[in-house]
Image (cartoon, rainbow, N blue to C red):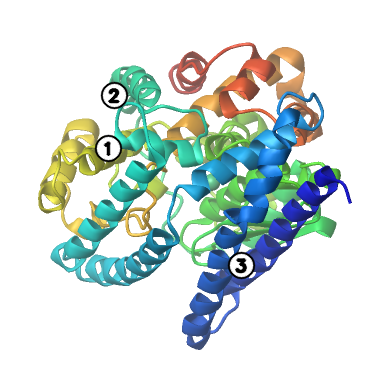
């Protein structure tokens, strides 16, 4: 068997192993009875270690070494380079650190849950300190040019540097803080639509309608319930999403379906021929998030799409929305108001939550901020960016699971996703002149096909910024995003 075939077979082994890991994880978060958690955690940890060992094995190393001459090959080069990049990152991290990290974060998650429940940061503090120390060690073994945060952000956004993020965030911060003030000053009284029950079944059906119109392929995926909505791909032919439905707030289920649906279209759009190759996955976390946020916010909360859904919503929720007209409904869905909880934030204040997390985790990692000073630093930033006081740590520094999971460097991808979504969308509007008119009649296929061709079908053949350059002819820029927000909320 030739070496290239061996190289492809090796990737197929990984992909089958990850298929199993993904099914076990999906089940863990959807249908697994609580009693199964310990055994499931053990199985998952075992399989993940196995995958890591396989990736850094001498067999992988030999293949990469022997096939180096292919790195500039037009066809095989991109496939080779993705594997090589993953190998070079993984091989630097000793198995002992991987194991220690898994143990520490699973404990940290448990203590974080308790701390959040009791509103007591001290329960979580020592565990967070350990997590930060391990993440710092990880950054050291991976290596970086300027600061440890560079090494971690690169795990989610290949090629992205902390200082690039800093520049983008600074521009956004300077524009968004006054923009929020401008918008809130113009808003009248908040339409109160949500102080009643909305039937679960109707909410589920509304989410399904949106997914169908988006072109989610139910023969190659399904939707289930879970506490926290997520998307997981077993393979382009089987992509799972979940939604959460609370009866008191009906549009949130529609938007979690559209958000996860956006992620799922990306995964379903990966070419089937790449299913067992490392190249057959998304370009990066931020590019992934650009897809979910585009569908959720730019399309899902637009006047065009909501006016299309409105007659259907009026029928489904005839009693609940009896006295509500479209304008109040649209305003309620797009209400802007600084709030404490990131996941419930509107699209204009959302990024302010991300800046807080980015600045704090960067300082934690660099040793400029100690864990014991974190709650105070958090509260000060919330007051300065959002203008509100944090009443207790559960609604402040303890609200997100990310730090307990060791996902330092992940938060910026949410805002980068928003920025990239607006860049892609602006380009789509440019290339599809009647896009808005089509969305207004529920025809979402033009946008989906455009995204499929330009983004989904490329897998991770290009680095995120190369993809942006190729699709939009530009580098990362906040202008389309700020223009979109101003056009929507100020005109
Ligand atoms: Co998402």
* Sooner in the amino-acid sequence: mark 1 or mark 3: 3
Of residues 375 and 363, which is closer to you in this image?
A: 363
- Residue lying at 80% horizontally and 34% vertically, measured from the top left: 445
Instruction: Spot the residue most to the bottom.
Output: 35
Q: Is mark 2 within 8 Å of ligand 1?
A: no
C-alpha separation, residue under disc 3 versus residue under disc 2: 38 Å
Mark 1 neighbour density, 10 Å: few (under 14) some (14–19) many (20 or more): some
* Sooner in the amino-acid sequence: mark 3 or mark 2: 3
| Left or right for 1, reference 288 | right
Element marked by disc 1: helix
* Sooner in the amino-acid sequence: mark 2 or mark 1: 2
Q: Which residue is mark 3?
A: 26
| Left or right for 407, reference 214 | left
Q: Which residue is mark 2?
A: 177
- Give me the disc on residue 362: 1
Which label sits in the foreground, 2 or 1? 1
- Residue lying at 36% horizontally and 58% vertically, measured from the top left: 401
Element marked by disc 2: helix
Mark 2 neighbour density, 10 Å: few (under 14) some (14–19) many (20 or more): some
């Amino acid at each position: 068997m030739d070496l290239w075939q061996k190289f492809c077979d090796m990737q197929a082994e990984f992909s089958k192993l990850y298929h199993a890991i993904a099914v076990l994880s999906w089940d863990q978060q959807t249908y697994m009875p609580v009693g199964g958690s310990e055994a499931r955690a053990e199985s998952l940890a075992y399989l993940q270690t196995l995958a890591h060992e396989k990736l850094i094995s001498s067999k992988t190393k030999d293949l990469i070494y022997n096939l180096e001459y292919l790195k500039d090959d037009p066809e095989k080069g991109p496939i080779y380079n993705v594997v090589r990049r993953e190998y070079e990152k993984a091989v630097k991290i000793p198995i002992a650190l991987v194991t220690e990290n898994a143990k520490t974060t699973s404990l940290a998650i448990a203590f974080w849950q308790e701390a959040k429940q009791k509103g007591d940061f001290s329960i979580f503090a020592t565990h967070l300190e350990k997590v930060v120390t391990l993440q710092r060690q990880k950054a050291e073994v991976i290596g970086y040019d300027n600061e440890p945060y560079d090494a971690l952000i690169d795990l989610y956004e290949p090629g992205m540097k902390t200082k690039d993020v800093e520049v983008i965030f600074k521009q956004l911060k300077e524009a968004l803080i006054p923009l929020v003030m401008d918008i809130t000053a113009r808003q009248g009284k908040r339409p109160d639509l949500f102080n009643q029950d909305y039937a679960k079944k109707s909410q589920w059906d509304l989410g399904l309608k949106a997914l169908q119109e988006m072109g989610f392929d139910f023969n190659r995926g399904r939707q289930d319930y879970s506490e926290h909505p997520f998307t997981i791909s077993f393979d382009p032919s089987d992509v799972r999403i979940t939604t959460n439905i609370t009866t008191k707030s009906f549009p949130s289920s529609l938007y979690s379906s559209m958000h996860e649906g956006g992620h799922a279209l990306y995964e379903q759009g990966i070419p089937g021929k790449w299913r067992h190759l490392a190249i057959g996955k998304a370009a990066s976390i931020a590019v992934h998030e650009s897809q979910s946020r585009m569908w959720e916010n730019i399309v899902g909360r637009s006047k065009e799409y909501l006016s299309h859904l409105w007659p259907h919503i009026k029928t489904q929720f005839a009693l609940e929305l009896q006295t509500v007209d479209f304008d109040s409904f649209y305003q309620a869905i797009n209400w802007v108001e600084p709030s404490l909880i990131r996941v419930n934030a509107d699209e204009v204040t959302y990024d302010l939550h991300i800046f807080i997390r980015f600045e704090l985790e960067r300082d934690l990692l660099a040793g400029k901020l100690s864990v014991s000073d974190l709650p105070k630093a958090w509260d000060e930033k919330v007051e300065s960016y959002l203008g509100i006081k944090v009443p207790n740590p559960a609604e402040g520094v303890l609200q997100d699971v990310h730090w307990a999971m060791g996902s330092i460097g992940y938060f910026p991808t949410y805002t980068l996703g928003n920025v990239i979504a607006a860049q892609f969308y602006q380009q789509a509007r440019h290339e599809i002149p009647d896009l808005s008119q089509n969305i207004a009649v529920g025809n979402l296929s033009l946008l989906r096909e455009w995204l499929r061709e330009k983004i989904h079908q490329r897998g991770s053949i290009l680095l995120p910024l190369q993809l942006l350059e190729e699709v939009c002819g530009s580098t990362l820029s906040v202008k389309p995003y700020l223009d979109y927000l101003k056009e929507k909320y100020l005109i």
